[in-house]
Image (tube, helix red, strand yellow):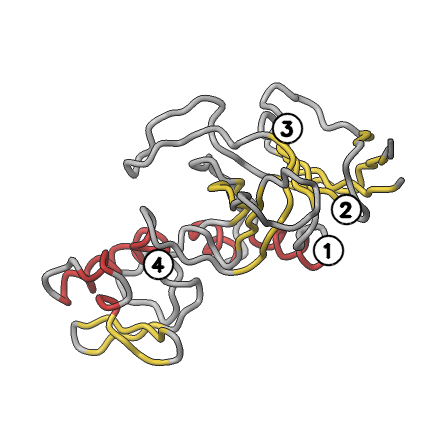
Amino acid sequence: MAVYKLTKIKEYDAHGGPAKETPGEDGHSKTPTQSGRFVINSVGKHVSYGKYAYWSGVAWGTPVRLIGDTVMVKHDGRWIQLSKVNKQWGEFREQKLITHAVKQAHHQISGMYTVPSAWIFNDFGHTSVKYFKDTNHNWRMDGKEKILGDFIHTTPGDEYDTSLKRPVRLGESHGCIHVKPLEIDTMIGNGYLKKGNTVEVHPYTDKAIASNLVRTIAQPLYEVHFYPGIYKIAIYRVTQ
């Protein structure tokens, strides 16, 4: 049996869901971040089609403009009304109600009651890392394997604070793993967060980061380990 040695090389701040399910302020339950070993399937901008389709139905950074009372977004290379992006926005009876909602959302983030020039409301930030349970250990998603609902991502408020070079204080998630915008870019740039790498979510009862670990199923070069009980991500170098 192969034995892989994991040596900690970096640490980053991170915040997951609560240890026990609780009601969320937005009407969606906050659940514990699922523990286990997973494999990253993709890294990129997220667009929602389900319960988060209002603000996350438009990709982060999408160009936005206001024409009269109508909010327009550049969708698939052409300008369309926000109300035509999906059925959720299409439920608004008047364009001015959509405009008010967008301005209000911008005010909550920035204090400015305006329509921004780019979409900064996607709940999953400028990039998201999605992973799956690799049941057959072949490092690719196939068969009945599917993406988990827990992602590694940033948030609009943290993105805005970062743009102003203000300190970022990570908040509790609905189950995903929240990280700082600059640090997710660093982890991606350094090759820690990339397709095929392992993400391990530890139990909430783990209250210290291990300097060294051993795993029988792994592959070089890096693994990303989240310790939800102490709000930290540890990066491990993998050797055999």
In the image, residue 98 above or below residue 178: below
Cβ atoms under marks 2 and 1 closer than 8 Å: yes
- Judged from the image, the secondary structure of the residue bearing numbered disc 3 is loop
State the SS at label 1. loop
Give the class, few, some or many, for how many residues have Cα within 10 Å of label 3's Cα (few <14, many ≥20).
some
Residue type pointed to by label 1 = Gly
Specify whether 203 is left or right of 155: right
Left or right of 220 in this view: 75: left
The residue at the point 33 percent across, 28 percent down is 23
How far apart marks 2 and 3 lie (CA) works out to: 16 Å
Quadrant of the rendered image containing residue 233: top right
N-term mark: 2 or 3:
3
Quote the CA–CA distance across marks 4 and 2. Answer: 32 Å
Q: Are marks 2 and 3 in contact (CB under 8 Å)?
A: no
Marked residue nearer the N-terminal end (4 or 2): 4
On the rendered image, what quadrant is the N terminus found in? top right
Is residue 31 positioned above or below 42 on the image?
Answer: above
Q: Could you give the CA–CA distance between mark 2 and mark 1, rounded to whole angstroms? A: 8 Å
Q: Residue at x 41, y 51 (%)?
A: 123
| Residue located farthest toward the bottom when viewing the structure as drawn | 78
Lower sequence index among marks 2 and 1 = 1
Q: Residues within 10 Å of mark 2 (few under 14, many from 20)?
A: many
